[in-house]
Image (tube, rainbow, N blue to C red):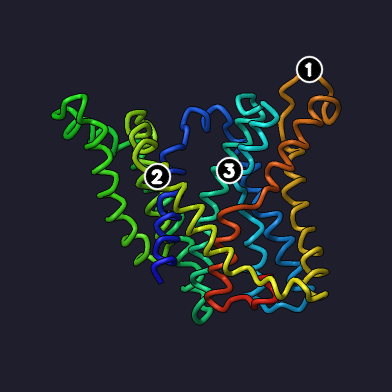
Amino acid sequence: MSIIIQRQCSLILLVLEAGIDIDITMLKLIGTRGLIIAIVGSILPIGIGIAIAFALGVDTKGSIAAGCCFGPTSLGIAMNILRQGKIVNTPVGQLIVSAAVIDDMIALIILSLLSALTGPVEVVNLVMPVVSALLFLGLGGYIALTWFPKLFNRYVLSRVSDEKRAPVELMVMLGLLLGLMPATYYAKASFLMGAFISGLAFCRSNELHHIFVRQFKRILQWLMRIFFAASIGFQVPIRNFGNGTVIWQGLVFCIALLGKIFTGFLVPNFNQARRFTDIHLRDCLITGFSMAAEGEFAFVIAVFSVDSGIISVDLYA
């Protein structure tokens, strides 16, 4: 039980950090194209995954859950690929990072939807979590980026000395975290949405970002490596990997990743080369294969689905 709690803590800190790390300026520069790539890069592989699951005889709930596992993109893996290729700070690199961040937001909405599949399937139970998650992300995100910073600076930070600003921001952010997580949970959205909005409210604060990295980064890395990764590792059904059916069905499910790779060809041409040739073709392939990197949220969705009984252990394998 303690390992599960610590895994949840690591996940909360991970999502909180994702909110803090949002670069509003970068998102504005990338604009609509990054949003389209993120949405298509989530919906297309999910749709392919659902179709494959249906073709393999999985029930409706299990098919939806199986398809949703192919939606998220691992920002951490994508960043490692971009760093090795030394293209993080290029337009295509920033496009990939933005799309991966938006994919994280979509993954939170997916988690809210899957939570509704754990009980009796009714229209209200399916619609409510999605509407709630979209409202928290849209309206809550808007307030976190516009009204909250102005009010917070005017009534709180203006009365605090410069050296105490970062600790005060950290305490207020943790207070928001403790308030928004129950609010999103009881509103039928994922409690992780509350963690994300709490971090998003302070994404423009460089001081808070520095103190968060200094105070929590090592703790987060420790939790991720020891507990989050280990607890998921404990749930890997190694014995099922010897089952021939599991192997060939797993290979078939890999077709869903073609939906991610296809999104790479939506990348605009940032160079003088002809479209889909030379450098532009390279940018398309880099984007596609970077988006195909499955990671943290994909495992979270899969583990949630098998723990909730939505999918079988064999399908999880």
Q: Amino acid at mark 2?
A: Gly
Question: Which corner quadrant of the image does residue 271 belong to?
Answer: top right
Cα gap from disc 1 to disc 3, whole angstroms: 30 Å
| Marking on residue 104 | none
> Few, some or many C-alpha atoms within 10 Å of disc 2 (few <14, some 14-19, many ≥20)?
some
Q: Residue at x 51, y 62 (%)?
A: 111
Mark 3 element type: helix
**Quarter in which the N terminus is drawn:** bottom left
First of labels 2, 3 by sequence position: 3
Mark 2 element type: helix
| Marking on residue 272 | 1
Q: Position of residue 37 (x, y in %)?
A: 66, 42
Whether residue 255 sits left or right of residue 139 in the image: it is right
Q: Amino acid at mark 1?
A: Gln
Camera-side residue of 113 and 204: 204
Q: Position of residue 32 (x, y in %)?
A: 59, 36
Question: Disc 1 or disc 3, which is closer to the eye?
Answer: 3
Cα gap from disc 2 to disc 3, whole angstroms: 23 Å
| Marking on residue 76 | 3
Check whether the beta carbons of the residues at disc 2 and disc 3 lie within 8 A of each other.
no
As drawn, the residue found furthest toward the bottom would be 120
Instruction: From the image, tell me which residue sits under label 2.
Output: 141
Camera-side residue of 176 and 162: 162
Question: Which corner quadrant of the image does residue 133 belong to?
Answer: bottom left
Q: Position of residue 240 (x, y in %)?
A: 72, 75
